[in-house]
């Protein structure tokens, strides 16, 4: 667990550097990625994998929106590196490998779970960002 | 004071810089609209897609101007998004538009080539993903070497305007080739090494902005960006499969 947290922290920071996020924001990007991954791993103990990723993505998006409000920077600066640890790379790879071995049944199975996991990430971001957009529009009308 | 043409240039430059840096469509349109209004234009309409921006507005003298800007290359540089974001905020707070134009030109001129340090950090990052896939330290180190090599290759070949699909496929193939050589000498999990190596090819910016475009109602861009992300994922898989297919997977 500790190793996974450290690995996702370093991984998120590295991708933040690759996408040239300003240096002072790197630690935050790393934190967002780490907390999202940790939540997802914790949730995976109780619920199935897709739900766990959904919970992880929701956490990632929530934290990055909060940080974005707090230091007034676009939230995608934290969101993009933050979701990297959640990307179902392993499943996508197994899909490719199964098709390569002419094992179409397993391939389709893996493909379906890849698509659902990617959908869970999208769903998590959608829920949080929509709520924040909604509240911002409401506030803008009142203010 | 800038004339209407120059104001248009400034707003258009801000928008196209945002778009080429990988910003969401909503941000591009909103920033351009706000800047144009602040600069004294009325009836501002902006329509941005991942491949082009259309903008039309009425000047104080009641003349209607329209501009189209085609966007061909996108390089994900989030620092530029952050810079333009704070610049447009400063403009709203009363920064003169001449200064904004100067700053925008400076941002545009910024070279954003990867140097070896950034590549090394990217490599370390992709290596650390080996742990997430259940690997050990050796697999992480080899994954990091592969990640670093892919980034270097993408940068060197990318100079020559190679189509992104081919470039990504070559990246996947390179990862598989290197890994096949590594596992000849070390007794390690081939899949984990390849997986952590190709992490640097994952189109993270596209995935995220695609989702956010869909939320803000930019269905055209959302679908376009999702399709691009899916194409890149297929390219990576195709590259790896091309090599692994030899001699049985």
Image (cartoon, rainbow, N blue to C red):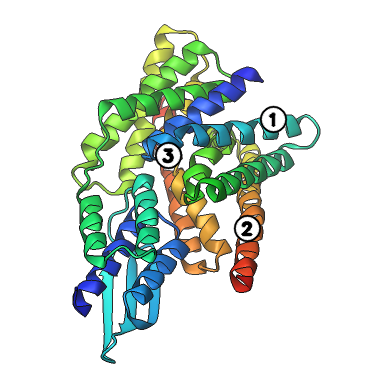
Q: Which residue is mark 2?
A: A132
Q: Nearer the viewer, residue B211 or B30?
A: B30
Residue B245 shows up from this direction: no
Q: Is residue B55 left or right of residue A133?
A: left
The total number of labels drawn is 3
- Asked if A99 appears above or below B217 in the picture, the reply is above
Quarter the N terminus of chain B occupies? bottom left
The Cα–Cα distance between marks 3 and 2, rounded to whole angstroms, is: 34 Å
**What residue is drawn where x is 25% and y is 36%?**
B155
Q: Is residue B111 left or right of residue B135?
A: left
The residues bearing labels 2 and 1 have C-alpha atoms spaced at a distance of 25 Å
**Where does the image place residue B159, in percent across and percent down from the top left?**
20, 42
Image position, residue B157 (x, y; %): 22, 38
Query: What residue is disc 3 on?
Result: B236
**Residue at the bottom extreme, as displayed:** B62
The residue that label 1 is drawn on is A41
Q: Chain of mark 1?
A: A
The subunit letter for the residue under badge 3 reads B
Residue found at x 52% / y 35%: A28
Residue at 34% x, 65% y: name it.
B94
For mark 1, give the secondary structure. Answer: helix
- Nearest the camera: B247 or B242? B242
Q: Sequence-wise, which precedes: disc 2 or disc 1? A: 1
Q: Position of residue B68 (x, y in %)?
A: 27, 74
The image position of residue A95, as x and y in percent, is 57, 38
Crowding near the residue tagged with mark 2, few <14, some 14–19, many ≥20 C-alpha atoms within 10 Å: some
Whether residue B202 appears in this view of the structure is yes
């Amino acid at each position: 667990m500790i190793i996974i947290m450290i690995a996702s922290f370093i991984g998120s920071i590295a991708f933040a550097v690759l996408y040239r996020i300003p240096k002072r924001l790197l630690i935050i990007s790393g934190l967002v990625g780490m907390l999202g991954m940790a939540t997802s791993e914790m949730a995976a103990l109780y619920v199935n994998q897709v739900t766990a990723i959904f919970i992880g993505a929701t956490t990632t998006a929530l934290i990055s929106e909060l940080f974005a409000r707090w230091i007034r920077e676009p939230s995608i600066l934290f969101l993009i590196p933050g979701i990297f640890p959640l990307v179902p790379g392993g499943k996508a790879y197994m899909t490719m490998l199964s098709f390569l071995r002419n094992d179409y049944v397993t391939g389709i199975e893996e493909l379906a779970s890849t698509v659902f996991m990617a959908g869970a990430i999208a769903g998590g971001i959608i829920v949080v960002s929509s709520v924040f957009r909604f509240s911002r529009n409401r506030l803008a009308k009142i203010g | 004071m800038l004339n209407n043409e120059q104001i248009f240039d400034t707003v258009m430059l801000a928008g196209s810089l945002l778009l080429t840096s990988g910003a969401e469509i909503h941000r591009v349109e909103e920033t351009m609209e706000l800047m144009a209004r602040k600069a004294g234009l009325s009836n501002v309409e902006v329509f941005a897609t991942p491949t082009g921006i259309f903008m039309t507005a009425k000047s104080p003298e009641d003349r209607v101007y329209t501009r189209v800007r085609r966007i061909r290359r996108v390089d994900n540089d989030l620092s530029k998004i952050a810079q333009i974001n704070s610049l447009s905020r400063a403009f709203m707070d009363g920064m003169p538009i001449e200064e904004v134009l100067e700053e925008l030109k400076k941002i545009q001129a910024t070279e954003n080539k990867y140097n070896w340090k950034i590549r090394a950090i990217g490599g370390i990052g992709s290596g650390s993903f080996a742990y997430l896939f259940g690997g050990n330290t050796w697999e992480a180190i080899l994954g990091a070497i592969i990640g670093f090599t892919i980034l270097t290759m993408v940068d060197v070949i990318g100079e020559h305007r190679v189509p992104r699909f081919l470039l990504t496929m070559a990246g996947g193939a390179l990862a598989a080739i290197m890994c096949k050589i590594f596992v000849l000498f070390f007794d390690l999990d081939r899949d984990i090494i390849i997986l952590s190596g190709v992490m640097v090819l994952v189109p993270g910016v596209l995935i995220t902005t695609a989702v956010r475009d869909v939320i803000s109602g930019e269905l055209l861009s959302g679908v376009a960006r999702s399709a691009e992300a899916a194409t890149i994922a297929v390219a990576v898989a195709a590259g790896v499969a091309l090599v692994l297919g030899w001699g049985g997977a």
